[in-house]
Amino acid sequence: MEQLGFLTILFAAVFTNNILLTNYLGMCSFLGCSRELKTSLGLGAAVCFVTAATSVLNWLVYAFILVPLDLVYLRFIVFIVVIAAFVQLVEMIIERVSEPLYTALGIFLPLITVNCAILGVSLFMVIREYTFLQAFGYGLGSGVGWALAIVAMAGIRLRLAQRARIPRGLEGAGIALIIAGTMALAFMGFNGMVSVN
Amino acid sequence: MREFLIAVAVICALNIGLALLLMLAGAWISDIGDRVITINGTRQITVAGGRALLTALKEQQIFIPSACGGRGSCGLCKVAVLEGGGPLLPTETPWLTPEEQQDRIRLSCQLKVRRDLSIRIPEALFNVRQYQTEVAGIDDLTHDIKQVTLKLIDPPAIAFTAGQYVQIEVPPYTLTDEPVYRAYSIASDAAEPGRIELEIRYVPDGICTTYVHQHLKRGDRLTLNGPYGEFQLQPTDREIICIAGGSGMAPIRAILLEMARTRNPRPCRYFFGARAKRDLFLVGEMRRLEGAIPHFQFIPALSAPEPDDHWEGETGLITEVVGRHVADASQAEAYLCGSPLMIDACIKVLRDKGMAEGHVFYDKFA
């Protein structure tokens, strides 16, 4: 496989291989927290930071602990534990450093722990055998991509709430899933530009 | 075999390592040092920062009333935070009216002490303490109301005013995973501070009432804190009208016992509402009080007497009975205790009889 550069992989993760819209990961908070622009921005930023940081952390754990000890099959559980611990740490630091940000993020911060997009990034990164730099690029790109998708979704839902007449049976999650599908179709337009596989 | 051991060891080491890291980080990051809380502009206490205001005050032996134990689900632990409170949290807003938010009222269980605070609490809360008690007796008053007698152990006595209430702590048992606190009025005479009586009515699936009715036994230990509440006899010469229903008897009884002890000469009528004869209790004691209090009349009323009750007293809803007996309430004072529904209905009747709003005092069951 040709070695992909940091920027290429970053771009690919944001657009052509958007973790949310091509892999449909991280759906739960994507649907739950996309009603308002402000909260979706906050959550997007937090996910972005955590994804970038945990992809690096998990890469180190994977390369220097799991592979040498032949424990690759433990990666699921180990990655989850690392992500959970990291989110806790982030929560503590944000609480100490910036009270307004902590108040604004509220419950979304601990919720990131169970965002499957973050675990997905760590798993894809080892399946695709990325180097350290590639892993960082992929993590950061996926985070940005996820944030982009949820902010776009929030914008669309806000518009929808203002003027669309949605059939009663489709209100809420129903229409949101249809929008997500349409967005995924739109993102398919980027396909073929770059491939990360 | 070796493989498994390595796997287990790695997972354990990783988990322990991360846990240690978090603990150290927690101790280092969350330790923001001591903070000073100024209470009512006079008293100053120093507490470790970073924890909830309610907990910090509790450790300094200042008890803010709280029924849920700090989970933000009862909305009782309101405190005025004048300085250093920071922005209102989303967990607080549902419990605070716009006026309260204007007055800088906060929920002390949600607010964390991050900066030096200046707060205002009722002076009476300084008298609130935690008490260890022993159950000296549990007696049936009716088919669903029990009288619980508690002997004070540590401290050995509780100073309270007739009409006040305490909160009892229900330890974790089948219905609850964590301690819960519920408020009950003291039904006994304030002149006997070494033992108090509570009247507790069974509510199906009620966490506290189920515990008291089905689990608590003589000789058990029970923790309580108090006393709380502003419900008490006002120092005036007005005629007194007491109205209660069910276990609302408790604070009224404490007030009547005090009136008997002090030979209070104010005219007093006590309307007590129940469904049928099996819901009536302490009638004998009330008749005795009619002799002990110079001008006192006890008027029990049944709303739905059974045929074999052979009831010859008052019948009808308590509001109707009060309406029949009280002609002019403009010179009287009223003390009400019971369900919110009953109290609201009684206030309406009393107002129609000319009683001023400020002369009605009540203790609503929450």
Image: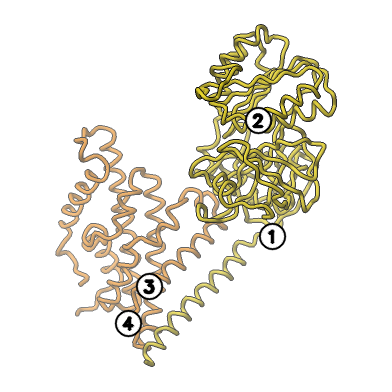
Q: CA distance from mark 1 to mark 4?
A: 43 Å
Colour for chain B in the figure:
yellow
Disc 4 crowd, CA 10 A, few/some/many (<14, 14-19, 20+): some
Indicate how the structure is coloured in the image: by chain
Q: Chain of mark 1?
A: B
Q: CA distance from mark 3 to mark 4?
A: 11 Å
Q: Which chain is orange?
A: A
Tell if the residue under mark 2 belongs to the same chain as the one under mark 4: no
Name the residue at the right extreme. Answer: B262
Residue at horizontal 26%, vertical 62%?
A19
Write down the residue under mark 2: B249
Q: Earlier in the sequence, mark 3 or mark 4?
A: 4
Write down the residue under mark 1: B33
Position in image of residue B18 (x %, y %): 50, 74
User: Mark 3 is on which residue type?
Assistant: Phe
Q: Which mark is residue A79?
A: 3
Mark 3 lies on a secondary structure that is helix
2 or 1: mark nearer the eye: 2
2 or 3: mark nearer the eye: 2
Q: CA distance from mark 2 to mark 3?
A: 61 Å
User: Mark 2 is on which residue type?
Assistant: Met
User: Mark 4 is on which residue type?
Assistant: Val
Is residue B36 at all visible to an observer of this figure? no
